[in-house]
Image: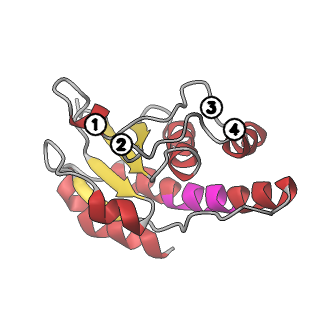
Amino acid sequence: MRQVANVLFISVENALRSQLAEACLRHVAKGHLNAFSCGVPGRLAHAVSPIALEVLYRAGMPIAQLKPKSWDLFKAAGSPRMDYVISLDEQTAREHPAWPSQPELALWSYPPLLWTLAPVSDRERQAEHVLLSLQRRIEFLVSLQARVAHRSELRGDLRDLAHI
């Protein structure tokens, strides 16, 4: 029996984009892939963005297990071995550490959402667009993963998903 692959999504604060991706993959994959997310040590948010929680709740996606986590958690001995690590912004793609088990790496770039003065409704709409884009990519990833015998077969496709 084939082992379920682990996917790690990274964004700087692990408050919105990577949390959306983790919840979306958990929802779409229904146990066929394991979803995780993390952020940069020292730059983590104190909590998941309330906007992310609201958008996920309205989309019917799970929010119970979400919380900001450092990538140090996934480098530690005994942590789950990652098969795929997907950076959601260029900054983390340049900075993230070498991962145990040498997972397949990809960049699905989503710029940070700059919401300083934007009304809540605009912030929610922007987050919904990010979630819909992630969902489209994640649905392809789940479909492709079901057809490969080894994660390396997905290397090019994983990176190509950044362009849809």
Amino acid tagged 3: Pro
Magenta: main secondary structure: helix
The residue drawn where x is 43% and y is 41% is: 37
Q: CA distance from mark 4 to mark 1?
A: 24 Å
Pointer 3 residue: 62
Q: Is residue 158 above or below residue 66?
A: below
Q: Which disc, if any, is residue 72? A: 1
Compare marks 3 and 1 and give the one earlier in the sequence: 3
Compare marks 4 and 1 and give the one earlier in the sequence: 4
The residue drawn where x is 74% and y is 36% is: 57
Residue 76 shown left or right of residue 162 in the figure: left
Residue contact between numbered discs 3 and 4, judged by CB atoms under 8 Å: no
The residue drawn where x is 36% and y is 59% is: 92
Pointer 4 residue: 53
Pointer 2 residue: 41
Coordinates of residue 29 in the picture (x, y in percent): 48, 40
Is label 3 in a helix, a strand or a loop?
loop
Is label 4 in a helix, a strand or a loop?
helix
| Residue range of the region highlighted in magenta in the rendering | 129-137
Compare marks 3 and 4 and give the one earlier in the sequence: 4
Q: Nearer the viewer, mark 3 or mark 4?
A: 4
Compare residues 149 and 15 and report the one nearer the observer.
Answer: 15
Question: On the rendered image, what quadrant is the N terminus found in?
Answer: top left
Check residue 131 for magenta coloring. yes
Residue 106 shown left or right of residue 120 in the figure: left
- Mark 4 crowd level (few <14, some 14–19, many ≥20, 10 Å Cα): many
